Amino acid sequence: MERPEFTINVKESMRLSMNIQAFVMEMVIEGQKQGEISNKYSPEMIQYILWASCMGVVQFVESKKNMLKNYREINVKELVETFSVMITEGIKA
């Protein structure tokens, strides 16, 4: 959705973005209530950090996809999986 070639009505894009943010926020709050996600940070801060981090990884992979595909030492699937584990471990309670 953040990529330039993604075409969508601005109003629709904002609605979709707000829905995604609300969903992630609900999951973070629920995770904090259940003791699975740390209460050290506010749900808002966790949600924004998750969003920004995911955007960064996706944009990196997209902008470097030809280089990554031809560079044997970097496996895109492993990169994304490692990112997911690092983020998940970082917010665990």
Image (tube, grey):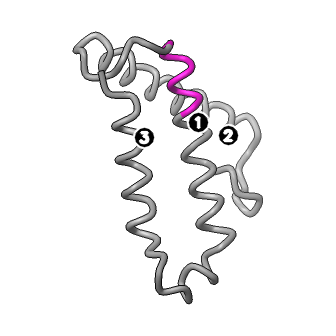
Camera-side residue of 69 and 27: 69
Which of marks 3 and 1 precedes in the sequence?
1
Is residue 87 a member of the stretch shown in magenta? no
Q: On the image, numbered disc 3 is attached to which residue?
A: 87
**Residue 80 place in picture, x, y as percent:** 44, 59
Q: On the image, numbered disc 2 is attached to which residue?
A: 13
Q: Residue at x 44, y 75 (%)?
A: 75
Kind of residue at disc 3: Ile
**Label 2 with label 3: CB-CB less than 8 Å:** no
Spatial distance from mark 1 to mark 3, Cα to Cα?
A: 23 Å
Q: Is residue 63 above or below residue 68?
A: above
Q: Secondary structure at mark 2?
A: helix
Q: Residue at x 25, y 22 (%)?
A: 36
Q: Secondary structure at mark 3?
A: helix
Q: Residue at x 40, y 45 (%)?
A: 86
Spatial distance from mark 2 to mark 1, Cα to Cα?
A: 5 Å
Q: On the image, numbered disc 1 is attached to which residue?
A: 16
Camera-side residue of 41 and 7: 41
Q: Is residue 7 above or below residue 24?
A: below
Quadrant for residue 39, please give it. top left
54 relative to 63 in the view: left or right: left
Kind of residue at disc 1: Leu
**Residue 93 place in picture, x, y as percent:** 29, 21
**Label 1 with label 3: CB-CB less than 8 Å:** no
- Image depth: mark 1 or mark 3 in front: 3
**Magenta portion: prevailing SS class:** helix
Spatial distance from mark 2 to mark 3, Cα to Cα?
A: 26 Å
**Residue 57 place in picture, x, y as percent:** 57, 55
Q: Which residues are magenta?
A: 42-49
Kind of residue at disc 2: Ser
**Residue 4 place in picture, x, y as percent:** 77, 59
Q: Is residue 82 above or below residue 29?
A: below
